[in-house]
Amino acid sequence: MIAGIDHEELVLLKFTKEEIKTKLRWEHSKEFEYNGQMYDIVSKEIKGDSIFYRCWWDHEETQLNKNLKKLVASAFNQDEENRETQKGLYFYLWSFFSPPVFDWQAVPFHKMEVVYEDSIHPNIFNAIRISPPTPPPKAS
């Protein structure tokens, strides 16, 4: 089918033998990817160190590959745009459910005084009263 296409609809690409190894990603002997675009080879001509490919620019397969890469990136959470959106949503929702900061400080034991001591169970319960700081803090 591709061989019957008008030559004006084909793309002529020129590469060196080294560029073929480094710049092209081959699907098989008649199809490659170059700069993110898929091409089907219709004819090939070698002139010295250069190789000329007359190709059908496969727009549909190019778009399919882009969609597939996007789906895979999304499935493995590697889609940068999606990841930033998820982070924003996470922090937004976290602001509703995160507990307030608890500012607790240990008080040395010698500043505590026992208010009530249970005479029946002396080791189980003691009410402890913490003395206010001396001198009291100044109100501003």
Image (cartoon, rainbow, N blue to C red):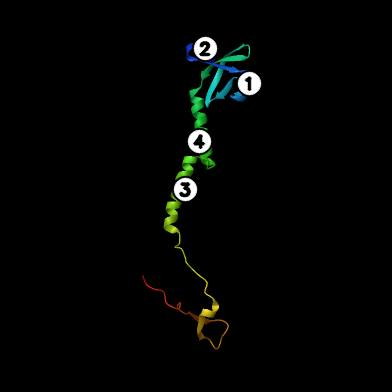
Give the residue displayed 49% in from the left and 40% down from the top.
Answer: 80
Can you tell which of label 2 and label 1 is closer to the viewer? 1
Can you tell which of label 4 and label 1 is closer to the viewer? 1
Contact check, label 3 and label 4, Cβ < 8 Å:
no
Q: Amino acid at mark 4?
A: Lys
Q: Residues within 10 Å of mark 4 (few under 14, many from 20)?
A: few
Give the residue displayed 46% in from the left and 40% down from the top.
Answer: 81
Total residue callouts: 4
Can you tell which of label 3 and label 4 is closer to the viewer? 3
Q: Is residue 90 shown above or below 133? A: above
Q: State left or right for residue 40 relative to residue 133.
A: right
Label placed on residue 55: none
Can you tell which of label 4 and label 2 is closer to the viewer? 4
Q: Amino acid at mark 1?
A: Glu
C-alpha span from label 4 to label 2 = 33 Å
Contact check, label 1 and label 3, Cβ < 8 Å:
no
Residue 109: in sight, yes or no?
A: yes
Q: Amino acid at mark 2?
A: Gly
- What residue sits right under mark 3 in the picture? 87
x then y, percent, for residue 65:
52, 30
Label placed on residue 70: 4
Q: Amino acid at mark 3?
A: Lys
- What residue sits right under mark 1 in the picture? 18
C-alpha span from label 2 to label 1 = 30 Å
x then y, percent, for residue 17:
63, 18
Foreground of the two, 127 or 66? 127
Q: Secondary structure at mark 1?
A: helix
N-terminal of the pair, mark 4 or mark 2, is 2
Quarter holding residue 108: bottom right
Foreground of the two, 67 or 135? 135
Contact check, label 4 and label 2, Cβ < 8 Å:
no
N-terminal of the pair, mark 1 or mark 3, is 1
